[in-house]
Image: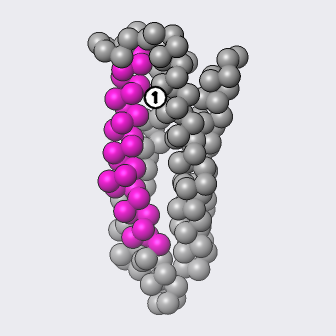
Amino acid sequence: MTGWLVVHFIGVLLFLGNIITAAFWKVRAEIGKNPTVIHSTVRNVMVADYVFTVPGLLLIIVSGVSMAVQAKLPMYGLNWLTVSLLLFAVTGLIWLTLLIPLQRAMIRHSAASVEKGAVTSAYRRASRLWDIFGIAATLLPLVILYFMVSKNF
């Protein structure tokens, strides 16, 4: 494997690994219905995004662009690369415009839940939206991964 491919692979592992495990831990915390555990978990999901998802994202972008330039891949027309880049941009928009604000709302509402001693409806509403958009923001990178490996069009 080339150096950039190794960097790309590490970035994908950090990125996909964190978004999948973050959802797992959030769901596990919510099953227990303990406001303190939920609050701690949603705070740590946000921390993990900054520690793992963002560096993974940066590694993916830098290495992906470098490999595409070196290989002189066409960045126009309908092909696996342009579709992957479009889906990657959509994923980023979902994350920036919806998921981050929802995570902040979940942290705020989960803190209120701790004070109240029960999970609030405001937290449940923000969490449900995070789940819906989080599924999309997780499935899209999995589709991208398929296109990147198969390069089938």
The kind of residue tagged 1 is Val
Question: Where on the picture, by quarter, is residue 81?
Answer: top left
> In this orientation, does residue 152 appear?
no
**Crowd tier of the residue under label 1, counting other residues whose Cα lies within 10 Å: few below 14, some 14–19, many 20 or above:** some
Magenta stretch, residue numbers: 80-107
Specify the quadrant that holds the N terminus.
top right
Judged from this view, the residue extending furthest toward the left is: 77
Q: Taking 99 as reference, is 126 above or below it?
A: below
> Which colour assignment does the render follow?
one colour
Q: Is residue 108 left or right of residue 35?
A: left
Residue corresponding to mark 1? 143
Q: Taking 123 as reference, is 54 above or below it?
A: above
As helix, strand or loop, the secondary structure at mark 1 comes to helix
Q: Is residue 3 left or right of residue 75?
A: right
The tally of labels here is 1
- Residue located at (54% from left, 79% from top): 35
Q: Taking 10 as reference, is 73 above or below it?
A: above
Residue 29, position in %: x, y?
Answer: 59, 67
Q: Is residue 86 magenta?
A: yes
Residue 139, position in %: x, y?
Answer: 45, 37
> In this orientation, does residue 114 appear?
yes
Specify the quadrant that holds the C terminus.
top left
Q: Is residue 123 magenta?
A: no
Question: Where on the picture, by quarter, is residue 26?
Answer: bottom right
Q: Is residue 3 left or right of residue 152?
A: right
119 or 55, which lies in front? 55
106 or 68, which lies in front? 68
- Residue located at (54% from left, 54% from top): 49
- Residue located at (52% from left, 85% from top): 114
